[in-house]
């Protein structure tokens, strides 16, 4: 019986030791999930356009302007795209150099001799070989070496195009 009693005491001591060991084990702390620091959303920097043009009553920005001039003609190409981007939309306005500074009435002038006008976008193309319905075009060299341009025309299909720079 003594052996039985010793055995019970041993079991009780082992149970107590296991209980102490179990109780003394600390639970690992659950890591707190922290939201990443809020960063201010940076809006892309949008450069202001050089100027604007109007096509069919809607205004569009102009981000690139290119000039070409020689003894016979002065041409300006404008686009709502920057020079390093594909020029899928553009207008070319030009005149005979002898008419620099003169406001040309397209009804009274010869297209491709006195003035040039081309407009292209992904949906429309107006060739320089199509006569404009009406309006005026003027290109004039400025004292600063640039050009002053005016185009206020009605295109062959009746849509309007206006540009002043």
Image (spheres, rainbow, N blue to C red):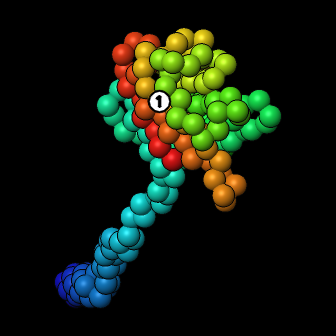
- Kindly identify the residue that appears in the image at 60 percent across and 11 percent down: 129
Q: Quadrant of the N terminus?
A: bottom left
- Kindly identify the residue that appears in the image at 64 percent across and 38 percent down: 100
Q: Position of residue 153 (x, y in %)?
A: 43, 26
Q: Quadrant of residue 110?
A: top right
Q: Position of residue 144 (x, y in %)?
A: 67, 59
Task: Count neighbours of disc 1 (C-alpha within 10 A) and say few if under 14, some if 14 to 19, many if 20 or more.
Answer: many
Q: How many marks?
A: 1
Please indicate whether residue 161 sits to the left or right of residue 69 in the image: left
Q: Which residue is mark 1?
A: 136
Looking at the image, which residue sits at the far right?
71
Please indicate whether residue 29 sits to the left or right of residue 100 in the image: left
Please indicate whether residue 37 sits to the left or right of residue 137 in the image: left
Q: Quadrant of residue 158?
A: top left
Q: Compared with residue 155, is residue 85 higher up or lower down, i.e. above or below?
A: below
Q: Position of residue 79 (x, y in %)?
A: 55, 38
Q: Quadrant of residue 28?
A: bottom left
Secondary structure found at label 1: strand
Q: Is residue 6 visible?
A: no
Q: Nearer the viewer, residue 2 or 38?
A: 38
Q: Position of residue 97 (x, y in %)?
A: 71, 34
Q: Compared with residue 132, is residue 65 higher up or lower down, i.e. above or below?
A: below
- Kindly identify the residue that appears in the image at 57 percent across and 36 percent down: 102
Q: Is residue 110 visible?
A: yes
Q: Nearer the viewer, residue 56 or 135?
A: 135
Q: Compared with residue 152, is residue 16 higher up or lower down, i.e. above or below?
A: below
- Kindly identify the residue that appears in the image at 43 percent across and 32 percent down: 152
Q: Compared with residue 65, is residue 45 higher up or lower down, i.e. above or below?
A: below
């Amino acid at each position: 019986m003594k052996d039985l009693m010793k055995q019970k005491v041993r079991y009780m001591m082992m149970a107590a030791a296991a209980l102490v060991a179990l109780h003394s084990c600390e639970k690992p702390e659950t890591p707190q999930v922290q939201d990443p620091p809020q960063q201010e959303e940076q809006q892309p920097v949008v450069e202001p356009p050089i100027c604007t043009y109007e096509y069919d009553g809607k205004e569009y920005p102009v981000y690139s302007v290119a000039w070409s001039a020689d003894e016979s003609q002065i041409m300006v190409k404008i686009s709502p795209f920057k020079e390093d981007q594909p020029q899928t939309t553009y207008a070319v306005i030009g005149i005979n150099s002898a008419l620099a500074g003169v406001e040309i009435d397209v009804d009274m002038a010869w297209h491709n001799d006195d003035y040039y006008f081309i407009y292209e976008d992904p949906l429309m193309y107006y060739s320089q070989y199509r006569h404009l319905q009406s309006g005026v075009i003027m290109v004039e060299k400025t004292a600063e070496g640039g050009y002053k341009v005016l185009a206020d025309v009605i295109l062959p299909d009746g849509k309007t195009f206006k540009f002043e720079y």
